[in-house]
Image: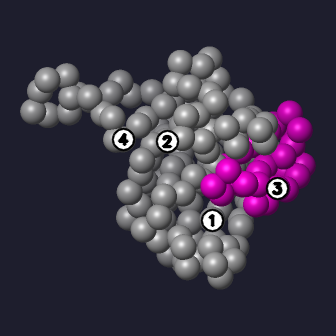
Amino acid sequence: RDFNMFAGKGDYAFALRCSGNNNVGFHIYAGGSWRPIEYVMTAEEKNNWYDQEHQILGLYDAENNLIQLYVDGALKEEVQTNTTSGVAHSDYNLIIGACPDTGRTSSTDFENIRVYNKALSEDEVAGQYADNPAITADNEAVELWVDFENITYDGKEEPVEPPVETFD
């Protein structure tokens, strides 16, 4: 299968990806096994997928043993995970556009990526799909906020390297 990785911490933690040319998937490794969710796009969605901007959001709510997948602000799939153990620890860093464990990569152009320390509600997800997100970069729920269109270079020819952060 052809995978286009959006973000991941390895096969034994979590990954958000597109597989083939017709589905979007999110999987977590929790409670000793994979907990996957996949959404098969409609014919219309497939026709409007490439060269278009999309918001893809994978959400794991350990407290309620639920995994959800949102595309462009709309809930597409949800599945009970049958575990409240949380995502397994990974020594890999979060990688944007690749999986550090499998070597799968991406040909996707990224506008931004955000990681939150809580499961967002459906209203919060819809608010994040807006031009002016409801939860902003300075919110305590934000663990990572990268806006690729507004990267500052600190007045140098070369980009400033951001600090490396790891997420357990």
Q: CA distance from mark 1 to mark 4?
A: 22 Å
Secondary structure beneath label 4:
helix
User: What's drawn in magenta, residue-wise?
Assistant: 58-87
What kind of residue is marked 2? Ile
What kind of residue is marked 3? Glu
Query: Residue 112 magenta-drawn?
Result: no
Residue 92 visible: no
Residue highlighted by disc 3: 78
Vertical side of 110 occupied by 38: above or below: below
Labels 3 and 2 touching (C-beta < 8 A): no
- Residue 145 in percent (x, y) is at 48, 31
Secondary structure beneath label 3:
strand
Callout 1: few (<14), some (14-19), or many (20+) C-alpha neighbours within 10 Å?
Answer: many
Residue highlighted by disc 1: 24
- Residue 104 in percent (x, y) is at 45, 63
- The first of marks 4 and 2 along the sequence is 2
- The first of marks 1 and 2 along the sequence is 1
Q: CA distance from mark 3 to mark 1?
A: 13 Å
Q: CA distance from mark 3 to mark 4?
A: 29 Å
- The first of marks 3 and 1 along the sequence is 1
What kind of residue is marked 1? Val
Q: Viewed as shown, does residue 161 lie left or right of 39?
A: left
Vertical side of 112 occupied by 136: above or below: above
For image coordinates 64% across by 78% down, the residue present is 44
Vertical side of 141 occupied by 27: above or below: below
Residue highlighted by disc 2: 113
Q: Viewed as shown, does residue 140 lie left or right of 91?
A: right
Labels 3 and 1 touching (C-beta < 8 A): no
